[in-house]
Amino acid sequence: MDKIIKSLLETDMDKFSMGQAIYHQFSDYKATWTFECRDKDVKFTKDMVEEIRKQILDYCRLRFTEDELEFLKSIKWIKGSYVDFLRIWRPRFDDFVITEDAECGLSIETRGTWLNTSMYEVPTLAIVNEVYFRMKYNYDELYTSFQEKLNDKISKLKSGEYSISTFSDTGMSRRLSRESQDLLVKSLSENTYAGSKFIGTSNAYLAMKYGVAPVGTMAHEWIMCVGQGNHKHNPAYSNWYAMDYWVKEYGVLNGTALTDTITTECFLKDFQLTYATLFNGVRNDSGDPVEWGEKMLKHYEKLGIDASTKTLLFSDKIDFEKANELNKHFKDRSKVGFGIGAYLTNDTCVPSLNIVMKTTYCNGMDVAKIADESGKGMCKSKAYVEYLQRCINWRMNND
């Protein structure tokens, strides 16, 4: 099989946004990441596991090119000191533990510095996904199906059947293949649409290739590791710590706050006037999106902030139909944006995989996410999840 990852720039932009802040403020933090396949009927064969291992080894041989570093340097919030670090950075294959010891037939863990292991998540998932679909199915048939569905989506956007304001591709980790995402970004970027605007992709390499915006700020790992990776922190205040260190790094730049790592209700305890003013907007990644959006608008109103100057960004299982309805509901009261994943990058005649890779330890301690809906968390310690929930409950009832 041809190389799946051919550039270290080929990862989500949020990895560079978080990576810079990790490099400057948490370079000594250690983290463990764990792969999980949530589809109980999916099985990886021994040949698949061996190909995944080979592809990850090839990925670990890559280095940044000067053109790629110049592209990163051109992004207004990326600093020269971080670019200089990336010039000498390389993935370490020794950080990976890849076995067949899992119910699905594939177990992957990465262990090392947070600075390193954070960078492995997206390329690893992209490799797993592409190997599975190429070896499980007739890939040419899948790719033809993908093209047909993409053409239909573009047609409906151009006609105005769907009006979804601004949207971006955020589906690298669950894409059908490298070539499918390339076709997607190329096709979306060369068309104009009635009532919709494609603004960019989270894939930094494709953003450079096609001259669109690289999109991505913080992910759940930032709140989990910053807030829960220090034994002196009360984990119910994870959002406060995470936003505080983010503002130290970026000021008013690069500011979309993720609300659901330890529930949005707890997030709002810390998202008071200073942070609500400094951050450009907020992102929904679990729970009922309409209920969440109304809650955020009410919160901005309570703080005396004009919500029409802020962005509600939706990224949880978004398709064009859902985006169309959400845009219609909120467009006159706030800016609205959508980060769209597998619906764009892996919509074929067979279902996409539900695979994730999450931080499970930071500095030797358990970390966890308690989202706004069940089934989206991942932690190896039931006792820690119960402890975190007790901390959240105490804060909600007493603070």
Image: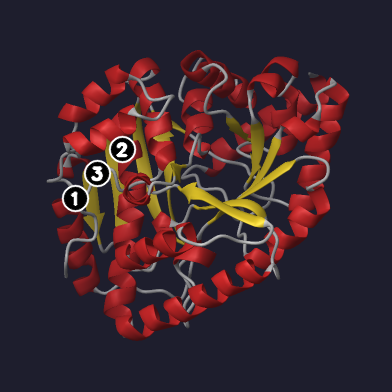
Please rate how many residues cluster around mark 3, counting C-alpha atoms within 10 Å: few if below 14, some from 14 to 19, many from 20: many
Residue type, mark 2 in image: Thr
Q: Are marks 1 and 2 in contact (CB under 8 Å)?
A: no
Q: CA distance from mark 1 to mark 2?
A: 13 Å
Is label 3 or label 1 in front? 3
Q: Quadrant of residue 93?
A: top left
Please rate how many residues cluster around mark 1, counting C-alpha atoms within 10 Å: few if below 14, some from 14 to 19, many from 20: many
Q: Which residue is mark 1?
A: 59
**SS at mark 2?**
helix
Of the numbered discs 3 and 1, the one sitting upstream in the chain is: 3
Q: Quadrant of residue 194?
A: bottom right
**SS at mark 3?**
loop
Q: Which residue is mark 2?
A: 117
| Drawn side of residue 340 relative to residue 16, left or right | right
Q: Which residue is mark 3?
A: 8
Residue 101 position in % (x across, y down): 29, 61
- Residue drawn at x 51%, y 62% is 191
Residue 200 position in % (x across, y down): 48, 48
The C terminus, quarter of image: top right
